[in-house]
Image: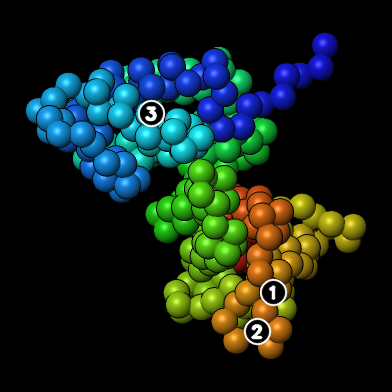
Amino acid sequence: MPEEALFEGVPEHLLRPLVRWCWENWPTDLLLRVALRLRVSFPAGINPKSPGEPVVLTIWSHFEQKQEVHKLLAVADMLLHEAAGDARDHALWFSAVERLNDTLELAGSAYRVSDEGSGLERRVDETAQDALRRAKELAQSPGASHYLSEAWRAAYGLAPDASKAYSLSIKAVEAAATPIVTPQNPKQTLGSMIKDMEQKPSKWRFSLPGKDRSGDVQPVIRMMATLWDGQTDRHGEPNPQPISTDHAEAAIHLAVTLVQWFSSGTVRARQGAWS
């Protein structure tokens, strides 16, 4: 039996469960803040002490009149992001996240709640999702884990930003590679790291032994160069080109692999490299 296609936006069968989730889980003042950001106007009589239900129903009506009910996903995304920042009641927040994730999965939505619970992101193959989690767990540098999370959100969030996703992917690799490649100069760019490794590749070892069993690091350098050279919108490029969605997604999956390798010891400095 063929796998059911995922639903974009807010299909009819998801509409009411999503609206109900919004008013059952969040205080009215938070709902009003989100509505304000989305430029939803309210009739007289609704204030921060009103129940959440009329606020959410007004938001729903606003978008329904504009034939933009898909923007209810943006409401949920903003609520998660705002609440994750406050974390005023962790138990209630965690429960709300779980309920929304279950609702989206049962409805066959193309979106899911991010692992951090801070917003919605496009549903991605579980193997790729697991690779991201593993890379973040292994990352010795907090920066590498942070940049990977932000790059993933920029690539797969409700409002994708391909250029940002690509730039953050490079930053994630820089953060993970610095302790291995340039521990004495933490401000090196990925480009300068590549040059250092090309000049003296014998300083590093790759766990895959290669044909000559030497642990040659050249395959890693080529992957790093592929990521670095592929940023076609970098400031100063003679002929800058916009980063496409596919371009950014390829970059972040490449970055996930490199971060995992540098963080796990798959790529490491040989003994005596810095003596």
Above-or-below relation of 218 to 57: below
Looking at the rendered structure, the kind of residue marked 1 is: Gln
Disc 3 versus disc 2: nearer the observer:
3
> Which of the marked residues, 3 or 1, is nearer the chain's N terminus?
3
Is residue 169 among what the camera can see? Answer: no
Give the camera-side residue of 29 and 160. Answer: 29
Using the image as rendered, state which of residue 66 and residue 170 is in the foreground: 66
* Left/right of residue 165 with respect to residue 126 in the rendered view: left
Q: Which residue is mark 2?
A: 237
* Secondary structure beneath label 3: helix
In this view, the residue farthest toward the left is 49
Residue assigned mark 1: 241
Give whichever of discs 3 and 2 has the lower sequence position.
Answer: 3
Residue drawn at x 60%, y 86% is: 236
What is the crowding at mark 2: few (fewer than 14 residues within 10 Å), some, or many (at least 20)? few
- Residue drawn at 61 percent across, 40 percent down: 131
Q: Are marks 1 and 2 in contact (CB under 8 Å)?
A: yes
Q: Residues within 10 Å of mark 1 (few under 14, many from 20)?
A: few
Question: In the figure, is residue 93 to the left or right of 7?
Answer: left
Q: Which mark is residue 43?
A: none
Residue 19 picture quarter: top left
Distance between the alpha carbons at the discs numbered 3 and 1: 39 Å
Identify the residue position indicated by label 3 in the image.
60
**Residue 60 visible, this orientation:** yes
